[in-house]
Every structure is written in C-alpha cells, then in structure tokens.
Image: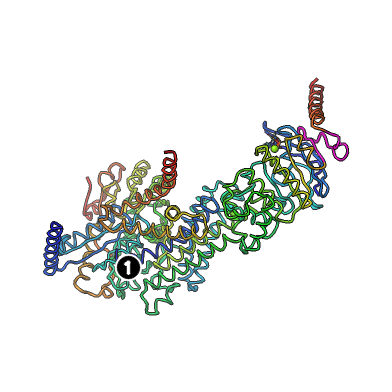
Amino acid sequence: MKKLKVISALFAAALVIVSAGAVFAQTYKVAVSQIVEHPALDATRQGLLDGLKAKGYEQGKNLEFTFQTAQGNPAIAVQIAKQFVGEKPDVLVGIATPTAQALAASTRTIPVIFTAVTDPLGAKLVKDLEHPGGNVTGLSDLSPVAQHVDLMQELVSDLQAIGVIYNPGEANAMALVDLLKSAASAKKIQVVEGTALKSADVQSAARIIASKVQVIYAPTDNTVASAIDALVGVANQAKIPVVGGSTSFVENGAVASLGFDYYQVGVQTADYVEAVFQGKKVGEIPVTFAKGSDLFLNQQAADTLGITLSEAMLKRASSIKK
Amino acid sequence: MIHLEDIRITFNANTILENKALRGVSLTVPERQFVTIIGSNGAGKSTLLGAVSGETPISGGRVEIDGVEVTKWPVHKRARYAARVFQNPLAGTCATLTIEENMALAHGRGKRRGWRLALSSRRRRLFQERISILGLGLEDRLGDSIGLLSGGQRQAVSLVMATLSDSHLLLLDEHTAALDPRMAAFILDLTNTVVEEFGLTVMMVTHSMKDALASGDRTVMLHQGKIVFDVSGEERERLDVPHLLQMFSKVRGEELADDSLLLG
Amino acid sequence: MSLFAFLGTLEIGLVYGLVALGVYLTFRVLDFPDLTVDGSFPMGGAVAATAIVAGVNPWLATGLAVLAGAACGLVTAFLAVRCGILHLLASILTMIAAFSINIRIMGRPNMALLGEPTIFTPFDNLGWDQLYVHLGLVFLLVLFSALFVVRLLSSDFGLALRATGVNERMVAAQGGSIGFYTYFGLALSNGFVGFSGALFAQSNSFADVTSGVGTIVVGLAAVILGQTLIPGRRIWVAVTAVIVGSILYRLAVAFALSTGMFGMQASDLNLITAVLVAIALIAPKMKGKVRLKAVTR
Ligand SMILES: Nc1ncnc2c1ncn2[C@@H]1O[C@H](COP(=O)(O)OP(=O)(O)OP(=O)(O)O)[C@@H](O)[C@H]1O
Ligand SMILES: [Mg+2]
C-alpha cells in the first residue's frame, strides 16, 4: 500500500514537470495520413519531417508527429481520418488523393494540408486554386507531362510511338495519361497504353507493348513506381529506353527522368504546415504546384542502349549517373 | 393419373459409358391406383420415378400427369402434381430448419411463395394436428431442428409433409430401405394409412417382394430397363413371394438365353 | 480512443454492416461463396456519386446504386446458373468486370462529393452535431435493412431461400426453382452491398474504385466474428450478430490504429485481420473439442 502511494506521488510529480515544460515551449501536433507506403510517398513524408525540423519544429521537442498508412484501402483511410480528427491536432496532412479526401470530409474546422495530389480541383479538395476558402489547401504534384514528351523526342530521333504503363484505377495516373495523350497528339506521336491493376502485372503489360514503341514512359503512378525494376528489365530486353516522371526512377535504370524529387515536395509541404502554425487562415493560402522539376540522366543505361545524350541535355541535368 | 409412353433414357449417350437405363417403358397408372415396382439393382426403377418427377431428363417418349403433358417441365414445376419421399431421410428434409419450417415448406408446394409469414398460429395448429397422427410425440417438438430426429422419424415427417399440399400423386423410392425392420414396418403402415385417407395415386419402389405384394393393388417388375412383368387384380391376389421369385429368375434366365442366341 | 473516433468507427461499422448482411445472405443462407461484393461495393459508390454530381436527388441516386449492385449479383447468378460456371469463379469474373465498368461509370477512378448534396445534407443544417446526425441516419437505414431481411427470411419465400442453401434437391421437390432463388438471393445480397457503397461514398464524400478491394474479407470477418460471439440459430439473432460483428471488426481496426497499442503499427492490419478470421473459424471447433474431452473424462 505504502509503495503504491510513493509511486503515485512520483507519477504526479513527473506530470507537473512535463506540463510545466509544455508551458514554456508550445508543442504542435501534426497528424499525417498516407494512402500506401512506397518510396515516393515515404520520401514526401520524410521531406515534410525534415522541412519542419529546418524551420525549428523538431519531433520530440516541440512537434508531435503522428503517422498512419491506409494500406491502399480507402475504408481504412476513413478510419484513420476519424481517429486523427478525434485527437484534435493542429494540422492534418493527407498524402495522395483518397487520404486527403477522407480528412477533408471528416472535419470542417481543423486545417487539412494535402500533398502529392495531382488534381486537387478534380478531387474537389478545393473549389479554387487561388482562394481555397475552406479549411483545406496544399501542394499539387502535377507532373510536367508536356516537358516529358519533349525530352523523349530529344532522346529518340524520329519518335513515332510512346508506350505508357499505368494503373487505370489510380486517379493521379489517369490524369497524367490524359495529359500525355494530348501532348503527344499535338506532335503527331502515337501513344500505346498498357494497363496494370497491380504491380505484379506491370511486367507482362510492358512486354505486350515493348515491341510496338520506341520509348516507354513511366508516369508517377503508385503501381508502376512499385514495379519500376520489372519495367526497366523488360525495356532493356527490348532495347528501348525508359523515361520517367519521378527522378528516383533513374536510380532504377531509367535513361532519363524529369520530375520532382518527392523529398523536396515534402520539404515544400512544410511551408504550408508552418503557415498554419503561425496562424494563417487556411482558406487564404493558395494551392501551388510543386516546384523544381529536375532532370536526372543515366549515362550508364544510355551507353548500354547505344543512345547518345546530347551536350545540351547533359548541361541541363542536375544529376548524371555514371 | 400418370401416363408414360415409350420412355427411353440413355445415360452418357455416345460415350464408352453409354447406359440404356430405360428402353421403352409404357405405363399408365389410373387415379387412386397404388403400384409397387420391383426389380434387381440397376433395373431402372429409380430412373423410372425420375422420369415422372422430372429429375432424370428423358431421351425419348412422353410423360403425362393428370392429362397434362409435362415431358419438358423442370422438377420444380412438376412438383405441384406429385409429392416425393426419398430413400435417404436426409434428402427429403432440410436439416438446418425446424420441423415446423420443413412442414411449412411442404405446405407451400405447388403454391406461389410470397411475403406471408411462413409460420402463422393457424398453420402451427394444422401442423400439430397432422403430425400427432404419427403418435411419436413430435407435436411438442415442432420447434426442434429436424436434423435432431432419427432417420425413421424423418421419413415419418416426410410422409406427413407429402400430404400437406393438395396434390394427390405420391412417388416413393425405397423409402423404408434405410430403416430398421420395426421402423420400416411402421413407415409402411403409415404409408398405407395416408394413401387410404387422402385417396392418393402411388408409385412405390421396393426391394421387398413381401411388401410389394402386401401393399397396393398392382405390381410391376422392371428388368434391364423394360417392364417384364405387370400383375394386378385376382392374378396378383394368388401370387406369393416364392412364386414371384420364381418368375423373377425365369425372366433373367430367358434374357440370358436370348443373349446367347444373339451371340450365336 | 476519442469520442469522435469512436462514433466515426461505429458509423463505418454500421455502413459495412450492410456488406455483412449481404455476405450473410450469400455465404450463410444460400451457401454461395460470392466475391462479387468487391465489385458491387465500389459500383454502389460510383453510381451514387455520378448520379449526384449529375444533379440527381441523393435518395434516388442511392436507389440507383442499390439497383446497380443487384445487377452485379444477377450477372454472377447468370454465369453460375445459366452458364454453369463454378460459383467462386463466376463471382470473380463479375468482380473483375465491375472494376472496368466502375471506371467507365465515373469516367475516372475517383469521384469526389465534397460540397455536393447527399442524403445527409438536409440533416446537416438542423444545427445538430454532424457526427451524431450521420450516425443516427446510418443506424436507421441499417435497422430498416435488417428488419427487412429478418421479415423476408421468415416468410414463405424466405423459407425456400434458406432451404436452397442447404438442400437443393428437396427445394426442387417442394416446387421451388433453385435458379430463381439463386438469382434473387445474389441480387438482394449485392443490392445491400451497393447500398453500403452508396452510403460510404456519401458519408465520406468520395467514391474510389480501389475501395472495393478486400470487401469480401471484411464482410466475411464480420459474419464469422459476429456469429462466433453471438451464436444462435434464430434469424434475428444471426442478423444482429453479423452487424455487431462488422462494428466489432471496425473497433478492432481502430484499436490497432491507436498508435503504440501492443506495439502494433498500421502495416500489421492485414495480419490482424487474418488472425482474427482464423481465430473465429477455429474457436467453435476448439470449444467442441474441449467439451468432448470434458465428457470423456
Ligand atoms: N445419373 C446417372 N448417370 C449415369 N448412369 C446412371 C445414372 N443414374 C443411374 N444410372 C444407371 O442407370 C441404370 C439404372 O439405374 P437405377 O438407379 O434406375 O436403378 P434401380 O433399379 O433404381 O437400382 P437400385 O435397386 O440399385 O436402386 C444403372 O445401370 C445405373 O448405373
Ligand atoms: Mg434405385
């Protein structure tokens, strides 16, 4: 009995100390909901965390950073949203479309920042990019698809047909393929589509189209991103280059990539979170498009395929894999 | 009335497994007649009942029930004319439903099944009344799952179920074969009572020569998919079991002789 | 768990209770393993969302979603009954086809309803707490659905439907058309699943084609969990059990999500679901064994 009293006294003392600490430095609570775990989205999350740290918000000190992934299941995303909203954090962050939608539907008061959402208007997250109005704003990662088509033309002389592998079930990917088709048709280039509902299907989808095209375009599609190695493997066998929408693809053997470093997308998202910390009204923060589309080249892959990377291209590149 | 005209049934036609189970059977069972059907294993007895109930699709011939041609009708449509009790007690009842639910199911045979409650107090009273005839004390156990009953009890309930809707045809395929002798005798008695009381027209398959002669008023013997023997009236009165057995072996012997002639 | 999270979990549990009801009808009543639900759930959401965005009254849109779900069931029944395709395979075919159709319906894989009118909208402006309003409305809809199923299964028609899953030969001998009951049962089941999808989309403001993945597992987990914890042969007990099972399943997920709980993390969810279903499947057998041992001793 006596022991119990001592313990509870100690516990009470500890509580006082902890809450006293909280008075001196306010702790901000950020809850991050991510639809699925894969390299690009994970990098976004890490970038956000590091970006906040650079601004003086450090986990364990004055930042409480909670994170959940929905395993690709929208119903779980909804449950995560309910749980997060119930915990009343200062900012909710939704990585990718369904998680952002689930968060936005669960609260009209807590600020919701989305990131890595390709089409925020189509997803009805905001009514207006300049003046979102409600409690939701964020960062779009719309890929510069027109620039990708230019890049492919630069790489392959007399380009007639581009192959693209994507998951028709992903909102982001569909939007990109539509952009690709309009950009390509403007230049009278044919687009051959290959669809993969799951990452295991990427390889066979690539095999089917590989012989009909001169280059394969890998969009920032979660399914393709998870199976990028398999895609590159097929392309190598067919002796055609892969051009990607995500710079990380170069690491996996793509000849060239023009896109975001998703880590940097996360870092840029930190600006939004900080703005909310500082008391800015969410409805007045405009939606922006992720900045800094870097060109990554892969000299090694180009050599294997017998493709010459032009001087101009090499000059533009921010990273060249040798 | 059941009218069968030159029924032919071939299983696995045009394969090495081809089996002519019925090779031209014609049989007319008038209203209120009780026919018993005998024959060795594989003679085609079950197949013949199947031709009436619709369970075995026929390859040739014509089936008429109560003057209506039903040759192309599916089983569930013919069910409005004929009730059946199977050899396997498990086959004729629904194990997970209660006794009264099984009875309600049978009560709806041949009627449109709608939104009405399956178990009204009026129906319960009817079921209680009917099942009490059995004298098995089941009237107090209507809410029990029928799976809890013994095979004999289930066959008894099946017979009662056969009388719950107003068809007057009853098809029985060795419905006492799975029971112990005492229970078999009880079910056969019950069958005779029920047939008498409701004025039913019956086709009953049995392996017991004794039962075949003791029940009903006509006996038909099948052999290799043909009717080889058909007795009724006085001729049948005079028959006894040894006599019948003798005819049975004679039929088989003749068949053999025929075959050897053909081969020679 | 916060009150908000708890009420939200109840709501999702109830919405998926309709899936459990559908799965109960196919797996338990009809004994027809039906994976169509993975396609009819998102189809319900897709149809409701598309109709609402096109300006259709939300209640009417929900009705259309129910019909769309039922149509999926009919397709599976057609493949199984008319074409004689193995039940499981027939339902997988419909499920796969539904994925493409859902994208066609919406014209895109994800359709948002944020800011669109839903069946909840008229109640949102009454000044009550939105969370309670959603929960209350969903509860009433699920209650009516459950009462409908209980009443249906107690009718002459329902009795034949129940017998179909146990003894087809007997049902045919009693004048019931097996084919017809299969069509009806699958349509009814998937109609409920489509209804569930429509409610999910409207309550959470989006329809997404990927929301169908694993619906069958969730429904089955709810049925097994519920019927193990609340055993009983009576229809209303079984129907209550599967809906309670669905709520319990969602509560289990919510607990798993509450960070730090038992040192689990979110990516353990699939494992937890599998273990849950396995335990529920094994438990009744174990109970029987223990009892048997006790008797032989
Ligand atoms: N579904 C079926 N497919 C193939 N052959 C069948 C089928 N049903 C019956 N047969 C065959 O048809 C013949 C007649 O069978 P049936 O069941 O009518 O005989 P039975 O007179 O009822 O015999 P038992 O006294 O053994 O019940 C047998 O040779 C049997 O093997
Ligand atoms: Mg037989």
Q: Percent from the top left, x then y, of residue C116?
A: 42, 73
* Magenta stretch in the rendered image: B218-239
Question: Which residue appears at 79% of the width and 32% of the height?
Answer: B241
- Residue topped by disc 1: C4
Q: Is residue A187 above or below residue A284?
A: above
Residue B225 counted in the magenta span: yes
The answer to whether residue A65 shows anywhere in this view is: yes
Q: Quadrant of ligand 1?
A: top right
Q: Is mark 1 within 8 Å of ligand 1?
A: no
Query: Which one is nearer the viewer's eye here, C77 or A294?
Result: C77
Q: Residue furthest right?
A: B234
Subunit that carries the residue with mark 1: C
Q: Is residue A105 left or right of residue C197?
A: left
Give residue C132's quadrant in the image: bottom left
Q: Amino acid at mark 1?
A: Phe
Give residue A168's quadrant in the image: bottom left
SS for dot 1: helix
